Amino acid sequence: MKSLKFILLIFAFVFINTAFAPQKQLVNDFSLMNVDGNKVSLANYKDAKGFIIVFTCNHCPFAKLYPPRLNELNNKFKPLGVPLIAISSTDTMMYEEDTYPNMVTKAKEEQFNFPYLFDEMQTVAKNFKAQKTPHAFVIWKENNSWVVKYSGAIDDNGMESNKVTETYVADAVNALLNGKPILTKETKSIGCQIAFRKK
Amino acid sequence: MRFNIFCILLVISINCSAQHIQVIKFNELKQRVFNQSDTTYVVNFFASWCAPCLKEIPAFLQLIDSSQNSKTKILLVSVDFKTDAKKNLEPIINKYQLPPIYLLDEPNGNVWINEIDNNWSGAIPATLIVKKNKKRKFIVTSLTYPKLIKLIKLIRLIKLIR
């Protein structure tokens, strides 16, 4: 009798745990055109443990503050198996500045050391639930799927990089690399809305 | 002499802009709009660099005009970068003949964005319509004047039902 109670208790515990555990956000691989004319997919990176995916664009003044910091992140984490990929999903009908040729120019001017992909159909932004630029995600490989581990700001001060005290993205990646829990999984920051085209 | 006139003009212009842009912290904004008064607050978050935000400014100006002597207050809150806010905001203030606006002095959005709305990522334009801190509507798309009027009426309706 006692053991039956015990088993029931375990069942209840498992049930509660699964029912109330936060849902994992999974994202799909994609194939998008890079500024060098080649298509890029996550599957291209055989040894990647995870990725830093940053939805950004040319026109947004908030996004314009970050290219040097994105280069730095890629420099630091690509050798550790966590490359950075930037994606532009803005509606180019609204912002001429964000067209593919202008992306090519921007990547050259700012010397991007990472792929800068054109999400023309905005499907990748929708899949990630990216809402603005810049909007960063840290995704990690678990059982052959890509799981969102962090979503939000790159750090806590867009305007003045010398006054940054919280490096959210770098902290999340470091935690994952060291098998430690991520302290801040989601943050908010001002940015330019990614306006999704109506069908 | 010329220099004197220049100085006087400079002082006047600095004073004008000082009256037009009031720098506030989030806590001050909170006290201003989340209170128990009978007023419906319409808080529009915008920036000089945000094109869709500028597009909806005329709608807010029309609302300000039509809301005089009513219990609706409209607050235009800029989230411009503080360092070059004055330079960037002044042409917009002049162009649209804006009433005094607020400049939110909070470089880290993560400390205040959730308090406006839990589901807000921080994308602008964004508008909060709030009364007595309980009845809220929060919209993250460009608004038109008729839509604004509709939303304010909705907030009042909530009051009637209660």
Image (spheres, rainbow, N blue to C red):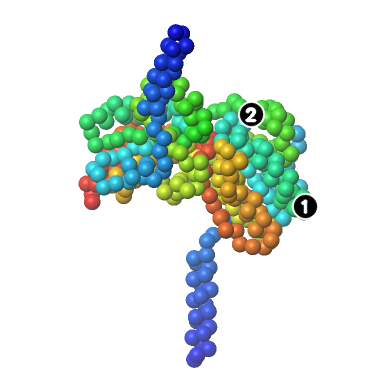
Observer able to see residue B58:
no
Name the residue tied to disc 2.
Answer: A99
Is residue B130 or residue B86 the one in the foreground? B86
Q: Which residue is mark 1?
A: A46
Relative to B156, is A147 on the left or the right?
right
Query: In this picture, is B61 found above or below B104?
Result: above
The chain to which mark 1 is attached is: A
User: Looking at the image, which residue is at 45% across and 49% down?
Assistant: B114
Relative vertical location of residue A22 with respect to residue A192 in this rendering, above or below? below
Q: Chain of mark 2?
A: A
Where's residue B46, x and y in %? 45, 33
Residue in front for this viewpoint, B18 or A63: B18
Is residue B12 shown to the viewer in this render? Answer: yes
At mark 1, the secondary structure is loop
Q: Which residue type carries mark 2?
A: Thr
- In which image quadrant can residue A61 be found? top right
Q: Is residue A155 left or right of residue A9?
A: right
Amino acid carrying label 1: it is Lys
- Residue A105, image x, y percentages: 70, 28
